Amino acid sequence: HREPVGVVGAIVPWNFPLMIGAWKLAPALAAGNSVVLKPAETASLTLLRIAALALEAGLPPGVLNVVTGEGPVVGEAMGLSMGIDVLAFTGSGATGRRLLDYSARSNLKRCYLELGGKSPNVIFADAPDLATAAKVSAAGIFRNAGQVCVAASRLLVEDSIHDEFVAALVAAAESFRVGDPLSLETQIGAVHSERQMAQKLRFVDEAEAEGAQRLTGGRRILTETGGTYMAPTVMAGVAPDTRLAQNEVFGPVLAVTPFKTEDEAIRLANGTDYGLSSGVWTRDLSRAHRMIRAIRAGVVHVNTYGGSDLTVPLGGVGQSGNGSDKSLHALAKYENLKTAWIQL
């Protein structure tokens, strides 16, 4: 028998609150559970509206509950609650670890954690169309100002085409319009906050100090409307053991590293603790299948990046977390399996 777990707690971030909230709400409710959802304190309005619309649509009161507030208050209370049976979270690894600790200190609730990534995007010299690969790769890191868990934030380029490809990618990066997201001409909006802006600029400064070369960006863009806008940034010559190559920036900063062989590309691609998304560009179908098997990630794109569909699961391995959002596979997180033996 498949039975609802009971009460699901969901904690979602500020970058795509409505979409990520829906990824957790829909399967949890469809499986027959009640939900307590905490949105980010800086991005609560869409999910409060969803709760109001759910009541209008006839969902019984108390089945979907949206509770606003700060993480150290509301999030901790949810993590330590004896009444929440499953906790689904999208956000940082540090917060995910705290939620696991809260689970251990309370009722051993199951925790499903989607914790971001440092996703490799591997460009081989035999990529079908280098110009297209450069444009798509630029969008893969700079979309939503790089504030995307699956962002292609590490660019691994075969040595023989490195300079040509990186030049095309820099041109694509510099073509993006950055500014007021309410303007229809804008392609990249704001960084989330002043604190986030300072962190991202610090990553650039530290990378330069470690020997990387800033090819474009790495600065704040001042606009008449104010706000926290950052120019798309490309850092070349990033050594694989440096902070920029190993840590998630969660902003519009791309780390570029050359490689010579397929084996080296695999080693570099798997050279972080994360394993959420990845990309491979090659005309060789056999190589594509080898890379799909070899790369340690929940998603592998081939000759594209950013593919998304609700019918397929999204989840990672390693320190990118566990469990899957989207698709029928997401239902398993919110169900208990019961075996019944009957002797007549």
Image: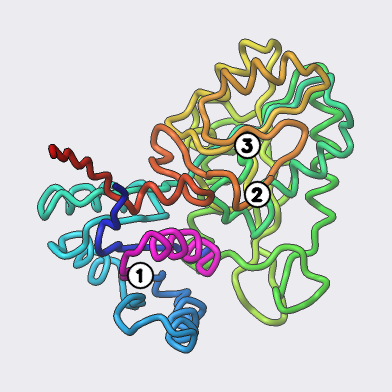
Q: How far apart are labels 2 and 3 at the CA level?
A: 24 Å
Residue 19 among magenta residues = yes
Q: What residue type is labelled 2?
A: Ser
Residue at x 47% of width, y 29% of height: 272
Q: State the residue lying farthest toward the front.
A: 344
- In primary-sequence order, the first of circles 2 and 3 is 3
- Numbered range of the magenta stretch: 16-37
> Where, quadrant-wise, is the C terminus in this rendering?
top left
Left or right of 176, for residue 309? left
Q: What residue type is labelled 3?
A: Ala
Residue at x 77% of width, y 77% of height: 183
Q: Quadrant of residue 31?
A: bottom left
Residue 324, position as x, y percentages in the image: 45, 45
Q: Name the mark on residue 37.
A: 1
- In primary-sequence order, the first of circles 1 and 2 is 1
Q: Disc 3 marks which residue?
A: 255
Residue 245, position as x, y percentages in the image: 54, 33
Categorize mark 2 by other alpha carbons within 10 Å: few (<14), some (14-19), many (20+): few
Q: What element carries label 1?
A: strand
Q: CB atoms at circles 3 and 1 under 8 Å apart?
A: no
- In primary-sequence order, the first of circles 3 and 1 is 1
